[in-house]
Amino acid sequence: MSAAHLVVLYHTPKDPAAFEKYYAANHLPLVTKHAKEIGITHVVLVKFAPNSAYYRKGELTFASTDALNKGMSTPGFKAVADDIPVFATGGFTVLTGEETP
């Protein structure tokens, strides 16, 4: 069984300072609050260098694709997903995938 990943690529926000403030004070605590319910096993957060194609990346790891699918059906996941458009004023892209050799 291979680990599965959900990646959120954030485009450059209209107001980076407001993004960072909300992300740190509201969104990340919301993810932490629901991580166990959702089934997240690992989180990687990246802030890219200026002039990159994306502004930030949030990558959530799950034990398997089944665990990812189960996690995506929880109320906690809905709360986290519904929060993203509140602060991601530049837009975002969501990708899912499974580790392969």
Image: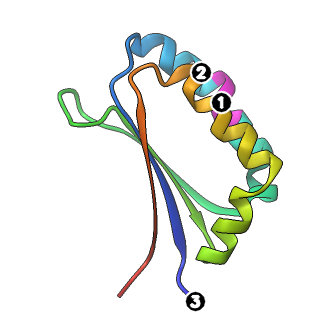
| Relative horizontal placement of residue 58, taking residue 42 as reference (left or right) | left
Looking at the picture, tell me which residue is in the foreground, 83 or 20.
83
User: Mark on residue 86?
Assistant: 2
**Is residue 26 part of the magenta span, yes or no?**
yes
Horizontal side of 3 relative to 97 (left or right) equals right
Residue 94 against residue 1 in the figure, above or below? above
Look at the image and give the residue range highlighted in magenta.
25-29
- How far is the residue under mark 2 from the one under mark 3? 35 Å
Disc 1, SS: helix
* Cβ–Cβ under 8 Å for marks 1 and 2: yes
Mark 1 → mark 3, Cα distance in angstroms: 31 Å
The structure residue drawn at horizontal position 45% and vertical position 19%, both measured from the top left corner, is: 89
Q: Quadrant of residue 1?
A: bottom right
Q: Where 95 sits versus 16, above or below?
A: below
Q: How many marks?
A: 3
Circle number at residue 83: 1
Q: Secondary structure at mark 2?
A: helix
Q: Position of residue 27 (x, y in %)?
A: 64, 31
Tell me the amino acid under the disc marked 3.
Met
Q: Amino acid at mark 1?
A: Asp
